């Protein structure tokens, strides 16, 4: 194999320029997202103590948040996140790392994420960024679309009796007698069926803005929770006067009452009942509604949200999984907002 022994003087520069010309997503994030705006919220998750005179200095908290963004974008474990930062120049550049000692190890990444989980920081960051979107006039009052997506976690090999006890809020005695086994049991996740297939995990219930396709609100539940059960939680006071679109999961008298109470126009799909088929007019109306409702599929199919969709979230408990799901929603809004800014040629950052 022929080797090039004469490495060009500007080879690294040319390589970086080529990466930039290919629209590096990490460069786009640093260009359009004002990361420092999140620092006051992130700081609330950590107690301020007098710094010690010895030992390794603490990692920058905003940089650590960006580490979690990388981790979710590429669906990495804590160990693989540490390795990829060590190995990839693009990751180091994104994080502003210039020295080996600035790279966090897997345990540090885990601890940082746990602190954000404990203080519900991801939810606050999502809210703050949506306020930025609102102030930038990227969110319009032109209707809302609601839907839910299943997020899988490793399946639990439990007996029917064990599953029954868990659903009743009890912990099987043999689990209590075996702490190591109990640590590996997800007591929050649950089973559901969709299109004849069985899934185990959670649901990401979202509401998006019709015009921008930006996520304006979300809730995380066990997968067994029916989509319609979260309708009241998803609709907010600011939605009054707008139309709401949803598939047939949001139909029925109870959903109609919730939508009416929210003072919204009901544009959810109608369904047929036993001995009462849909009329041709209702079928045509459903087809028209689908043209708008289908916009939500863009969110669940977006690469940085659903990258490696067949892979599982290998975390235990709804609080930990909610952090991951919330980060995915935030990352989607980051990139969707950047796309809108570039398409409209707006001179703004968020």
Image (tube, grey):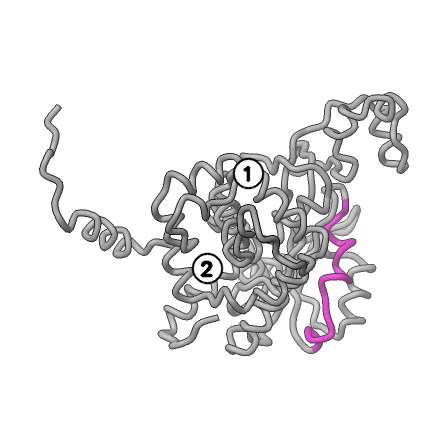
* Rendered residue at 64%/50% (across/down): 323
Label 1: how many residues lie within 10 Å, few (<14), some (14-19) or many (20+)? some
Nearest the viewer among 244 and 1 is 1
Residue 74 lies within the magenta run:
no
Element carrying mark 1: helix
Element carrying mark 2: helix
Check the image and report above or below for 212 versus 248.
below
Residue 218, located in which quarter of the rendered image?
bottom right
* Rendered residue at 65%/35% (across/down): 153
Residue 230 lies within the magenta run:
yes
Q: Position of residue 182 (x, y in %)?
A: 79, 28
Residue 228, located in which quarter of the rendered image?
bottom right
Q: Majority secondary structure of the magenta segment?
A: helix
What residue sits right under mark 2 in the picture? 335
Mark sitting earlier along the chain (2/1)? 1
Nearest the viewer among 56 and 39 is 56
Nearest the viewer among 256 and 198 is 198
* Rendered residue at 59%/73% (across/down): 131
| Residue 19 in view of the camera | yes
Label 2: how many residues lie within 10 Å, few (<14), some (14-19) or many (20+)? some
- In the picture, the disc for residue 106 is 1
47 sits to left or right of 252: left
User: How many marks do you count on the picture?
Assistant: 2
Residue range highlighted in magenta:
225-240
* Rendered residue at 73%/23% (across/down): 157
Say which quadrant the N terminus sits in.
top left
Q: Position of residue 322 (x, y in %)?
A: 67, 49
């Amino acid at each position: 194999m022929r080797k090039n022994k004469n490495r060009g003087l500007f080879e690294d520069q040319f390589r970086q320029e080529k990466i930039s010309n290919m629209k590096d997503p990490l460069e786009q994030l640093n260009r359009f997202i004002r990361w420092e705006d999140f620092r006051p919220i992130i700081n609330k998750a950590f107690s301020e103590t007098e710094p010690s005179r010895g030992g390794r200095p603490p990692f920058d908290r905003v940089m650590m948040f960006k580490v979690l963004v990388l981790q979710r974008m590429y669906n990495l474990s804590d160990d693989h996140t540490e390795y990829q930062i060590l190995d990839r120049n693009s990751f180091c550049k994104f994080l502003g790392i210039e020295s080996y000692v600035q790279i966090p190890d897997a345990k540090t990444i885990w601890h940082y994420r746990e602190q954000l989980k404990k203080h519900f920081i991801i939810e606050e960051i999502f809210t703050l960024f949506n306020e930025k979107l609102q102030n930038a006039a990227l969110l319009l009052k032109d209707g809302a679309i609601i839907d839910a997506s299943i997020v899988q976690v490793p399946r639990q090999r439990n007996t029917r009796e064990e599953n029954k006890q868990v659903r009743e809020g009890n912990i099987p005695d043999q689990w209590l007698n075996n702490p190591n086994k109990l640590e590996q049991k997800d007591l929050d996740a649950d089973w559901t069926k969709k299109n004849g297939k069985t899934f185990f995990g959670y649901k990401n219930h979202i509401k998006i803005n019709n015009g921008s396709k930006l996520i304006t609100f979300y809730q995380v539940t066990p997968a067994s929770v029916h989509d319609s059960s979260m309708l009241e939680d998803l609709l907010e006071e600011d939605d009054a006067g707008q139309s709401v679109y949803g598939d047939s999961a949001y139909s029925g008298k109870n959903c109609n009452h919730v939508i009416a109470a929210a003072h919204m126009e009901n544009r959810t799909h109608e369904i047929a009942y036993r001995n009462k088929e849909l009329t041709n007019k209702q079928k045509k109306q459903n087809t028209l509604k689908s043209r708008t409702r289908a916009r939500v599929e863009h969110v669940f199919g977006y690469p940085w949200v659903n990258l490696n969709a067949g892979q599982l979230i290998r975390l235990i408990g709804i609080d930990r999984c909610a952090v991951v799901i919330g980060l995915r929603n935030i990352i989607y809004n980051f990139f969707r907002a950047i796309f809108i800014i570039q398409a409209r040629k707006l001179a703004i950052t968020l």
